[in-house]
Image: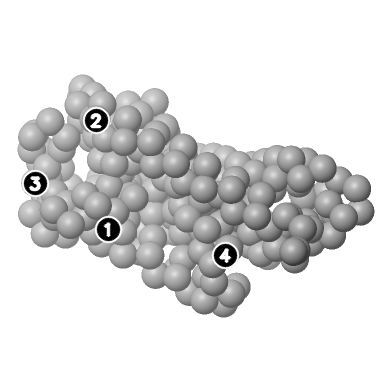
Amino acid sequence: MAFRDEGRRPLLLILLVVVPAYAVLRSIATTEETPRRIGLPGDLSFVTTMKDIHGAVMAGQAIAFVAALCGVFVMHAALQGDRRLVIAGYRPGETIVARLSVLAATTALVVGVSLGVTAMAFEPESWLPFGAATLLIGLIYAGLGALSGAILDKVAATYLMLFFPLTDLGIAQNPMFGDGSPEWWATLLPGYAPSRVMVDGALAAGFEATGPLALSVVWSIGIGAVVAYALRRSVAPVA
């Protein structure tokens, strides 16, 4: 039922497929191959080009943006209808699993699309950490979108999820800015750990991002648990 509910929104398909495909391909295609030194995990530095940096980071930015908006939509759909489903006889766990499944499926779709179009224009050094990092970014930001949807009204949550991924992944974690490494305050943001794994997988010959990978998993599990709790609260009987 939750999948049918989301399927009634034709703009969702455009959001999940067209937006990341256009953003990734367009950004890589229009970026010049200007040399750039950046910092990598393990206190390493690496000379690459602005074009390759865009190839390394643009998928994550597109995924965060789209997954966060999907999180907002899924949470608001839950707030509007799931309590009535429970009153009608559905078990609370069924509605929670259904909404989490939709959130995971939409995230997986946008990750798949983003990786597919990235492969058309850029070849990471190692696909496994690169792909894992983009998936973790998607899960983290899908959860953050859902939480913002639980706290704010739909318009405010949407604006927040337009602003926050851009600030985090588009600016704070972006090696195209500054000296090529995140500032200290950027390490406090949810995009820091998975973005370091993503850049490492995209550009480094070896894997030096074990710590950021573990932190990314902690972020995704923690946010997922809070989202599950928020969904449980959304179907709780009104006192």
Q: Which residue is mark 3?
A: 37
- How many residues crowd around disc 1 within 10 Å: few (fewer than 14), some, or many (20 or more)? some
Instruction: Decide which of 49, 6 is in the foreground and name it.
Output: 6
Marking on residue 149: 4
Q: Does residue 201 show up?
A: yes
Comparing labels 2 and 1, the label whose residue is closer to the camera: 2
**Which kind of residue does numbered mark 1 sit on?**
Thr
In the image, is 148 to the left or to the right of 10? left
Of the numbered discs 2 and 1, the one sitting upstream in the chain is 1
Tell me which corner region of the image, top left, top right, bottom left or bottom right, holds residue 235: bottom right
What percent of the width, then of the height, locates residue 8? Answer: 79, 61
SS class, disc 2: helix
Residue ID for mark 1: 31
Q: Nearer the viewer, residue 89 or 144?
A: 89
Dot 3 falls on a residue whose secondary structure is: strand
- In primary-sequence order, the first of circles 3 and 4 is 3
Q: Which is closer to the viewer, label 3 or label 4?
A: 4
- Mark 4 residue type: Gly
Q: Residues within 10 Å of mark 3 (few under 14, many from 20)?
A: some
Residue 211 got which mark?
Answer: 2
Mark 4 to mark 2 CA distance (whole Å)? 30 Å
- Determine whether 119 is above or below 18 in the image: above
- Of tags 3 and 2, the one toward the viewer is 2
Q: Residue furthest right?
A: 88
User: Please, what is the three-letter code of the amino acid marked with disc 2?
Assistant: Gly
Q: CA distance from mark 3 to mark 4?
A: 39 Å
Q: Where is 14 relative to 140, above or below?
A: below
Q: Earlier in the sequence, mark 3 or mark 2?
A: 3
Which circle, 1 or 3, is nearer the viewer? 3
Q: CA distance from mark 1 to mark 3?
A: 16 Å
